[in-house]
Image (tube, helix red, strand yellow):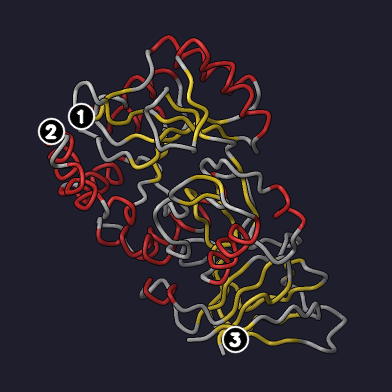
Amino acid sequence: MGRTTDMTADVIRVRGPVLTGPGADDVRDGLWVLDGKVTFTRPARDHDVQVLEGYALPGLVDAHCHVGLDAHGAVDEATSEAQATTDRDTGTLLIRDAGSAADTRWIDDREDLPKIIRAGRHIARTKRYIRNYAHEIEPDELADYVRQEARRGDGWVKLVGDWIDRDTGDLSPCWPAEALEAAMAAAHSEGARVTAHCFSEDSLAPLVEAGIDCIEHATGLTEETIDLFAERGVAIVPTLVNIATFPGIAESAEGKFPKYAQHMRDLHERRYETIAAAHEAGVPIYTGTDAGGSLSHGLIADEVLELTRAGFTGVEALNAATWAARAWLRRPALQEGEDADLVVYSADPREDVRVLKDPRAVVLRGRVVSRAL
């Protein structure tokens, strides 16, 4: 279905169920948008009211997204704008940008583009990550670079926890324990949280024991590390739409790195079982797509659907993309007096999350920025 943009700033009336939380009682009978803010009280100013009908959710959260990045590194502002607009039009109104080589601060001045929480630039071991993406450094520099990116970001720092080691021909951890401990202390002293890209099994426990706050992908989780994550409250953002690319990665690496190729296939094969076990153990799990590298933007609905394939109920999957994700990122949902960042759907997404693929209207900062034709 086509989309159109309507940047009117009149009073908006959302008529229909407003889902303010995951519980059965977390449903309000409509809301109004006045001066860009949510209110559940009918305003006195009721002229020029724009009516939107349907089921309303808080703006969706993509907690692992890279605006300003493509497969080769930083992109120009026009490309960054197109990426952010695609995410917006599919309902993503809050992004945790999990590492970008581009400066996208200018997006903060655009009322029509999603809100971004930045993690600065990736921090990786020398020659152990994608070219042009990261600060590539050695362990004795890690704490200093973490402190630097903590000050540049919006409360997050992104490490590369493991990558292929060409000497062993397989995934291996990038950092010794003492470097990780110093890095976590540096980030936390700056008021920032730390997350890390991790595919393999061996990189996880040292990161958690050093005090990390989140792990991206987490395909290498085992029974032992799942228990450790649950005990420490370490979140994961599994990016299942990205894990779906592992067989292709394995095929391209087969000739030169057969051990790595088989490892990637094994991680892919058990992906749903891994996430289901983590979920059952109480590990906090949130949605992220890893868009902006080799993946296209606008995939958040696909990621929510993937969580249901890993055993989440529809409401649990929605929670990972809305209310719980916003609370984890310390951002409001649909609350009195807060920015009206919401998405309206024609049917109840709790009953069928596939509804998320086709938003009826997207409201950002109190303005209708996209709606179905």
Amino acid, disc 1: Asp
For label 3, the residue is 53
In this rendering, which labeled residue sits more in front, label 3 or label 1?
1
Q: Position of residue 93 (x, y in %)?
A: 59, 61
**Which one is in front, 29 or 75?**
75
For label 1, the residue is 170
- Of labels 3 and 2, earlier in sequence is 3
Marks 3/1: CA–CA distance: 52 Å
* The C terminus - image quarter: bottom right
Instruction: Kindly tell me whether residue 287 is visible in this rendering.
Output: no
Callout 2 secondary element: helix
Q: Position of residue 265 (x, y in %)?
A: 15, 45
Amino acid, disc 2: Lys
Residue in the picture at 40% in, 27% down: 232
In the rendering, which numbered label is found on residue 259? 2
Callout 1 secondary element: strand
Label 2 Cα neighbours within 10 Å, binned few <14 / some 14-19 / many ≥20: some
- Tell me whether the residue at label 2 lies in contact with that at label 1, contact meaning CB atoms closer than 8 angstroms: yes
Residue in the picture at 28% in, 30% down: 164
Residue in the picture at 45% in, 21% down: 211
Marks 2/1: CA–CA distance: 6 Å
- Of labels 2 and 1, earlier in sequence is 1
Residue in the picture at 51% in, 58% down: 322
Residue 246 against residue 163 in the figure, above or below: below
Horizontal relation, residue 315 to residue 340: left or right: left
- Tell me whether the residue at label 3 lies in contact with that at label 2, contact meaning CB atoms closer than 8 angstroms: no
Label 3 Cα neighbours within 10 Å, binned few <14 / some 14-19 / many ≥20: some
Q: Which image quarter: residue 260? A: top left
